[in-house]
Image (cartoon, rainbow, N blue to C red):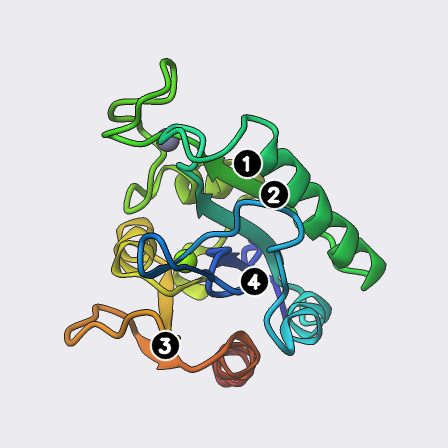
């Protein structure tokens, strides 16, 4: 498991907010948003176990996340780095190694120079998945993109990966282009493991 007959590796690409960690209620905006501080960064239940199982089955793990808070003037430049380090610490302590963590810090309507405007990497662009495929020789049709937004599904589809939509309390689209949906990452991981057994 984990490699196809050409030796290519299978991967699971994970959106971060709403999949790995909780979105945080912002009363001012009346909506759930990505965490602005490390204290607000809390893993969802079962995430470390699910990632460990996928890793054990041979899947490379990647985080692919849009993080426009700095571009929008909502957080300091180093806040994202502090949160990233917290994720790395939690994962490493559980024996989980991410092959890559890809963040887009841009936003089309951003206000911070250098981060505002269009970019090549913001999901739904498949830029980071394509980059990983080249870097790691990934078998994309047998790899997966997991996310809680339609843009995650569009990103996975554009790269030729299979997609799993995480239904969380924040938003449930009527139409989704996902191959399947799950209420949390641990169930998505079970689906992937069962599918890859059928395929091998
Ligand atoms: Mg998300
Ligand atoms: Zn970008």
Pointer 2: residues within 10 angstroms few (<14), some, or many (20+)?
A: some
Local SS, label 2: strand
Query: What kind of element bears circle 3?
Result: loop
Q: CA distance from mark 1 to mark 3?
A: 31 Å
Image quarter where ligand 2 lies: top left
Return the mark for residue 167.
3
What is the distance, in whole Å, between disc 4 and disc 2 at their CAs? 17 Å
Label 4 or label 3, whichever comes before in sequence order: 4
In the orientation shown, which residue stands out farthest toward the left? 175
> Whole-percent x and y of residue 95?
82, 61
Instruction: Give the residue displayed 37% in from the left and 76% down from the top.
Output: 169
Q: Vertical placement of 33 versus 1: above or below?
A: above
Q: Which residue is mark 1?
A: 135
The numbered disc on residue 143 is none
In the displayed structure, would residue 74 be above or below residue 8? above
> Disc 4 designates what residue?
21
* In this view, 111 is above or below 103: above
| Secondary element at tag 4 | loop
Check whether the beta carbons of the residues at disc 4 and disc 2 lie within 8 A of each other: no
The residue that appears at 72% across and 69% down in the rendered structure is 52
Q: CA distance from mark 2 to mark 1?
A: 10 Å
Q: Where residue 64 sits in the image (x, y, percent)?
A: 48, 47
Return the mark for residue 100: 2
């Amino acid at each position: 498991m984990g490699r196809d007959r050409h030796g290519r590796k299978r991967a699971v690409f994970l959106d971060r907010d709403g999949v790995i960690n909780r979105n945080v209620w912002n009363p001012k905006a009346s909506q759930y948003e990505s965490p602005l501080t490390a204290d607000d960064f809390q893993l969802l239940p079962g995430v470390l176990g699910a990632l460990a199982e996928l890793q054990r089955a041979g899947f490379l793990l990647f985080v692919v996340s849009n993080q426009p808070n700095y571009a929008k003037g909502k957080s300091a430049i180093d806040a994202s780095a502090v949160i990233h380090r917290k994720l790395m610490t939690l994962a490493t302590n559980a024996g989980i190694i991410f092959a890559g963590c890809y963040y887009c810090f841009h936003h089309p309507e951003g206000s911070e120079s250098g981060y505002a405007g269009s970019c090549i990497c913001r999901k739904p662009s498949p830029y980071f998945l394509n980059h990983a495929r080249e870097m790691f020789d990934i078998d994309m049709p047998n790899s997966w993109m997991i996310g809680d937004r339609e843009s995650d599904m569009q990103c996975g589809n554009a790269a030729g990966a299979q997609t799993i939509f995480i239904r969380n309390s924040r938003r449930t689209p009527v139409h989704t282009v996902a191959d399947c949906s799950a209420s949390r990452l641990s169930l998505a991981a079970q689906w992937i493991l069962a599918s890859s057994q059928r395929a091998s």
